[in-house]
């Protein structure tokens, strides 16, 4: 089933798909960063592909390899019942990938976690904050050069302004504004 | 300065809202209704939720980082602590992923046992979720009944695995141990009692006026939105999408048993509750079907490079001892590659994305916790609703702290 999807993707985006494999029944396409949005948009909207669900977003740090990082997307289609994995290589020093949160809302939190753990930024993401760790945390723990035993300094209590009403006031104002 | 002379003069136009400021309310991280530890920063307009910003991570303990530094077998105890309400399902999900990487097919009997024990865990998970929900809506007695049912099953789990919660029952290539000899009798004793408890719960809650008012029409999500947000499990099925990995992509013995996929239609809290109630009955069906068809045989696969040798060989032969030593100290050698393996946990799709570089330790182990994406969509479920709707919504989402924060 998903072999077809991979084959179609490869013929449609010859330049974008750098490499692919089908090992262990996991069809995988390695997509260049520049073309990612275009590919995802097509995978989402094309009738035959219909990848309507983003199962997971994660990343891998290969440390001694160039490019060092890879962002990994697992797609699923609830209608066609097929799966596809996209991998996007990311160079060290320019850790950023276009955000797919505009296509799948699931990417909102998934990408936040990748940013938190790997320090890979997602361009166009509306809410690029840390998610599991706190804002003052230094470093990104799932990078291979982050020591396992490293400890972080104790934090002072947060300033009371952080959750102040002002921060959210515009939500209220936006809603009341006449159309 | 203009001094108002009467109460009415303070607010001359009754159509203008005198109170126009929103209020920020912290719900959690330690709040009786926020089971687990999660904080919701709510922006309220009166009692209406304008914005909900969930803050997770209070139970973060670096699960994925820890797993990169232990052998493949040593990951099992950590997986118990992911979704601690149904630890067996996590055990089996991880074992399946590693077996896929190794290219191992487990024995027939192990397949059936994994199905049986997994479904028992699912019943416990659903009982806990439904019970906690009823408790928070004021039905204390429903909680007590359900916890009795969970305990009955935990007694069986304890006999089989040796622990009630931290079971560590699965192994790469099979299971730690076979079922106990009196397993069938124990289950025959427990099954009617659990069925009765489910029936009592159903009578207490399903047609209860208070319960229905709080659950029906709250926390609603549409089919398309649920898919787009990455919802799986009961939360997705309640919207009418019959996506169940046990049926769509069967593993273990699920392709050989009869069961129905329970779906809802409205996608609200009440439907999520009904889906869970229905699934418990299906789980009992699956267990009975498996017990009927389960063959005799070994529970561990015959693969000396993965499975520890028998203790007799370890103590009496040099080959056995070396084999034992290599597996314990160097770990199982898993061929290089990547795999995404997914199973149907109680809350939805539990995925393991594993990258191996061909050594005794995982290079990268990513868990896709189902409730991570459910929680990511909770703002959609509660924004515009009343603050009291958070209580049933947060419960039927069934966020598990150990799993979402890892």
Image: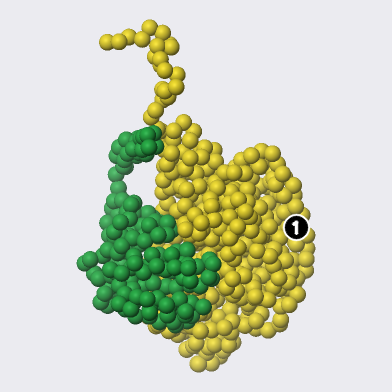
Looking at the rendered image, the quarter that the C terminus of chain B falls into is bottom left
- Left or right of A16 on screen, residue B253: right
Q: Quick one: which residue is furthest to the top in this view?
A: B5
- Left or right of B48 on screen, residue B165: right
- Give the residue at x 78% y 66%: B188
Q: Secondary structure at mark 1?
A: helix
Subunit that carries the residue with mark 1: B
- Tell me the green chain: A
Tell me the quarter of the picture where residue B300 sits: bottom right
Residue B243 x, y percent position in the rendering: 58, 64
- Give the residue at x 47% y 79%: A4
Instruction: Report the number of numbered marks.
Output: 1
- Tell me the yellow chain: B
Tell me the quarter of the picture where residue A46 sits: bottom left
User: Residue B231: in sight, yes or no?
Assistant: yes
Residue, disc 1: B195
In the rendered view, would you say B98 is above or below B381? Answer: below
User: Residue B276: in sight, yes or no?
Assistant: no
The colour scheme used here is by chain
Residue B62 x, y percent position in the rendering: 40, 62
Residue B230 x, y percent position in the rendering: 48, 60
- Give the residue at x 29% y 59%: A123
In the rendered view, would you say B379 is above or below B262? Answer: above
Q: Residues within 10 Å of mark 1 (few under 14, many from 20)?
A: some
In-front residue for pair B321/A110: A110
Q: Quick one: which residue is furthest to the left in this view?
A: A93
């Amino acid at each position: 089933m998903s072999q077809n999807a991979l084959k179609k993707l490869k013929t449609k985006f010859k330049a974008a798909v750098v490499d692919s494999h089908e090992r262990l029944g996991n069809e995988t396409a390695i997509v260049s960063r520049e073309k990612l949005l275009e590919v995802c948009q097509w995978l989402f909207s094309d009738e035959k592909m219909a990848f309507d669900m983003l199962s997971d977003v994660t990343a891998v740090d290969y440390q001694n390899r160039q490019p060092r990082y890879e962002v990994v997307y697992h797609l699923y289609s609830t209608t066609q019942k097929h799966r596809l994995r996209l991998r996007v290589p990311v160079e060290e020093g320019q850790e950023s990938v276009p955000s797919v949160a505009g296509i799948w809302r699931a990417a909102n939190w998934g990408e936040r976690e990748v940013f938190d753990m790997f320090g890979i930024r997602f361009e166009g993401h509306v809410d690029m904050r840390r998610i599991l760790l706190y804002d003052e945390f230094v470093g990104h723990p799932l990078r291979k050069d982050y020591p396992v035993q490293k400890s972080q300094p104790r934090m002072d209590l947060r300033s009371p302004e952080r959750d102040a009403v002002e921060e959210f006031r515009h939500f209220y104002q936006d809603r009341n504004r006449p159309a | 300065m203009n001094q108002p002379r009467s109460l009415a003069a303070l607010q001359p136009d009754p159509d203008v809202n005198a109170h126009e400021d929103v209020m920020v309310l912290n719900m959690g991280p330690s709040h009786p209704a926020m089971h687990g530890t999660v904080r919701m920063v709510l922006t309220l307009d009166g009692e209406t939720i304008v914005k909900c910003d969930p803050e997770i991570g209070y139970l973060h303990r670096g699960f994925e980082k820890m797993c990169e530094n232990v052998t493949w077998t040593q990951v099992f105890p950590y997986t118990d602590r992911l979704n601690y309400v149904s630890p067996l399902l996590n055990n089996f999900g991880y074992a399946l992923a590693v077996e896929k990487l190794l290219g191992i097919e487990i024995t027939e009997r192990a397949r059936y046992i994994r199905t049986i024990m997994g479904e028992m865990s699912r019943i416990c998970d659903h009982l806990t979720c439904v019970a906690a929900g009823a408790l928070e809506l004021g039905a204390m007695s429903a909680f007590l009944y359900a916890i009795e049912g969970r305990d009955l099953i935990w007694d069986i789990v304890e006999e089989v695995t040796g622990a009630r919660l931290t079971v560590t029952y699965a192994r790469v290539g099979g299971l730690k141990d076979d079922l106990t000899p009196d397993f069938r009798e124990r289950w025959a004793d427990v099954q009617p009692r659990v069925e009765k408890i489910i029936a009592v719960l159903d009578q207490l809650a399903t047609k209860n006026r208070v319960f229905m008012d709080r659950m029906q029409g709250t926390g609603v999500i549409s089919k398309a939105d649920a898919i787009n947000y990455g919802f799986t499990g009961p939360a997705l099925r309640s919207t009418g999408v019959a996506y169940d990995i046990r049926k769509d992509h069967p593993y273990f013995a699920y392709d050989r048993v009869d069961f129905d996929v329970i779906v809802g239609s409205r996608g609200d809290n009440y439907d999520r509750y009904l889906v869970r109630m229905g699934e418990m009955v299906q789980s009992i069906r699956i267990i009975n079907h498996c017990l009927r068809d389960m063959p005799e045989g070994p529970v561990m696969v015959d693969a000396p490079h993965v499975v520890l040798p028998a203790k007799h060989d370890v103590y009496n032969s040099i080959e056995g001892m070396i084999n034992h030593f290599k597996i314990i100290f160097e770990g199982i050698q898993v061929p290089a590659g990547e795999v995404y393996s997914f199973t149907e946990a109680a809350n939805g799709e539990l995925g393991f994305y594993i990258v191996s570089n061909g050594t005794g330790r995982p290079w990268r182990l990513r868990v896709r916790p189902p409730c991570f994406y459910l929680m990511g969509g909770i703002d959609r479920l509660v924004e515009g609703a009343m603050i009291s709707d958070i209580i049933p919504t947060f419960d039927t989402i069934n966020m598990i702290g150990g799993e979402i924060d890892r």
